[in-house]
Image (spheres, rainbow, N blue to C red):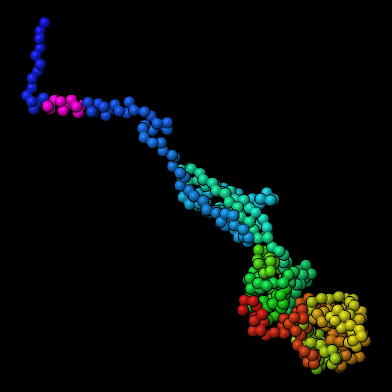
């Protein structure tokens, strides 16, 4: 057996070896610590668990959630930030019907294209994704106004009544609303008349239900008029809202203007500015003179019962009358017509004997009836009567252009 003596090193060398052994042990321990530690349930080695990253995209909806008394014409708008919209569904909660809409080209904005209904609740369900494919969704509801009453925009003349014949150059366009209009300016902003060729014109409120549109001068023959009332959702005031939008088209036929003169007791007829006929007349007597100014034909009937009671003159008033007249065309709402009257033929051309009408003999009355129609003009001069009032159906031309413009709610 051989005995080995311990190796003896100098003091400084011994210390260095010990330090080296310690460093090696620490290094081995550090390298092996990952194997001897525990693994977390989420797969991470040691430490606290972490959540998946939230989607970068966010959604916003207008009108705001749970909005009430929303105008049905206010669009629903969904916007995505940090991503794109994948789909949006807007549903009438009561009816289950869907509201149509469209996405912008970059798919960041969806806007409804259908008008909403009155007094309805809508459910909105929107979805979007971020560039990494993470999705987000958002829901909302809005409720629309429930009007106390809904006003219709009736047109005079009725478009169907003049679809074949067109209207004359003097024809005003009249919107007659089924309820009073308090917010006239708000309503007038939604009314339009576009003329082709273009002609200057404007609106005049005759009363709280009737607003008239006329050009500065008579319409040009051949003009096409596109008339619109975009009143759905418009607040008329007093709980009344517009019932529905309306757009109609009128066509203006040739110019026919009759000029009746109380001095000459003649009526001259002009077609597109050229006189084509002259006929003897008898206008209103001194007690019932014919109104002065431009009248517009509003109605015609080959056989018509004229009754003064329809405008408040009834028996035993000595001016009251009731008679069956031929070839009649109304020129004002207080009983003035152009018509045949065989009883006044002897006075025609010399004396005014009527109750305010313009009397003609049979042949002239029939020619006039067959030639002139709705919207054509009868200008009365030297009758001894007052000016036709602006409110007398179509007394529109009694006002100068500057006076007419003052009747707009926007003036």
Where in the figure is residue 55, as x and y percent of width and height?
47, 45
Of the pair 384 and 185, the residue shown nearer to us:
185
Asked if the magenta segment contains residue 409, the reply would be no
Residue occupying the point 77% across, 70% down:
158
Where in the figure is residue 331, as x and y percent of width and height?
80, 81
- Name the quadrant of the C terminus: bottom right
Residue occupying the point 48% across, 43% down:
134
Residue occupying the point 82% across, 76% down:
299
Where in the figure is residue 279, as x and y percent of width and height?
84, 87
Asked if the magenta segment contains residue 23, the reply would be yes
Which quadrant holds residue 10? top left
Q: Is residue 359 left or right of residue 133?
A: right
Span highlighted in magenta in the image: 15-24
Q: Is residue 215 left or right of residue 379?
A: left
Of the pair 136 and 356, the residue shown nearer to us:
136
Q: Is residue 170 above or below residue 32?
A: below
Q: How many marks?
A: 0
Q: Is residue 253 above or below residue 58?
A: below
Of the pair 53 and 21, the residue shown nearer to us:
21
């Amino acid at each position: 057996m051989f005995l080995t003596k311990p190796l003896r090193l100098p003091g400084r060398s011994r210390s260095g070896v010990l330090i080296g052994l310690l460093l090696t042990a620490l290094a081995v321990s550090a390298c092996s610590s990952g194997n001897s530690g525990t693994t977390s349930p989420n797969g991470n080695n040691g430490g606290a668990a972490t959540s998946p990253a939230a989607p970068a995209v966010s959604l916003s909806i207008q009108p705001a959630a749970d909005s009430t008394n929303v105008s049905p014409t206010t669009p629903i708008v969904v916007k995505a930030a940090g991503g794109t919209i994948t789909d949006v569904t807007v549903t009438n909660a009561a009816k289950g019907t869907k509201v149509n809409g469209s996405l912008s080209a970059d798919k960041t904005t969806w806007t409804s294209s259908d008008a909403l209904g009155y007094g309805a609740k809508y459910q909105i369900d929107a979805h979007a994704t971020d560039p990494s494919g993470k999705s987000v969704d958002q829901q909302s509801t809005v409720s629309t106004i429930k009007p106390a009453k809904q006003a219709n925009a009736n047109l005079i003349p009725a478009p169907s009544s003049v679809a074949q014949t067109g209207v004359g150059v003097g024809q005003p366009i009249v919107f007659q609303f089924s309820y009073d209009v308090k917010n006239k300016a708000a309503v007038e902003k939604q009314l339009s008349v576009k003329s082709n060729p273009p002609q200057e014109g404007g609106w005049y409120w005759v009363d709280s239900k009737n607003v008239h549109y006329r050009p500065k001068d008579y319409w040009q023959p051949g003009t096409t008029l596109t008339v619109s009332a975009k009143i759905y959702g418009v607040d008329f005031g007093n709980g009344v809202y517009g019932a529905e939008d309306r757009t109609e088209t009128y066509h203006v036929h040739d110019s026919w203007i009759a000029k009746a003169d109380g001095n000459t007791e003649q009526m001259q007829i002009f077609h597109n500015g050229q006189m084509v006929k002259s006929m003897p007349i008898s206008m209103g007597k001194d007690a019932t003179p014919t109104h002065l100014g431009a009248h517009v034909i509003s109605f015609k009937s080959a056989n018509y019962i004229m009754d003064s009671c329809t405008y408040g003159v009834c028996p035993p008033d000595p001016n009251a009358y009731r008679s069956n007249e031929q070839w009649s065309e109304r020129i004002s709402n207080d009983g003035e017509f152009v018509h045949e009257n065989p009883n006044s033929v002897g006075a025609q051309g010399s004396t005014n004997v009527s109750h305010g009408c313009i009397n003609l003999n049979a042949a002239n009355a029939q020619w006039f009836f067959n030639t002139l129609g709705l919207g054509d003009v009868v200008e009365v001069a030297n009758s001894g009567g007052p000016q036709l009032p602006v409110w007398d159906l179509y007394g529109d031309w009694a006002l100068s252009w500057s006076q007419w413009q003052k009747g707009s709610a926007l003036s």
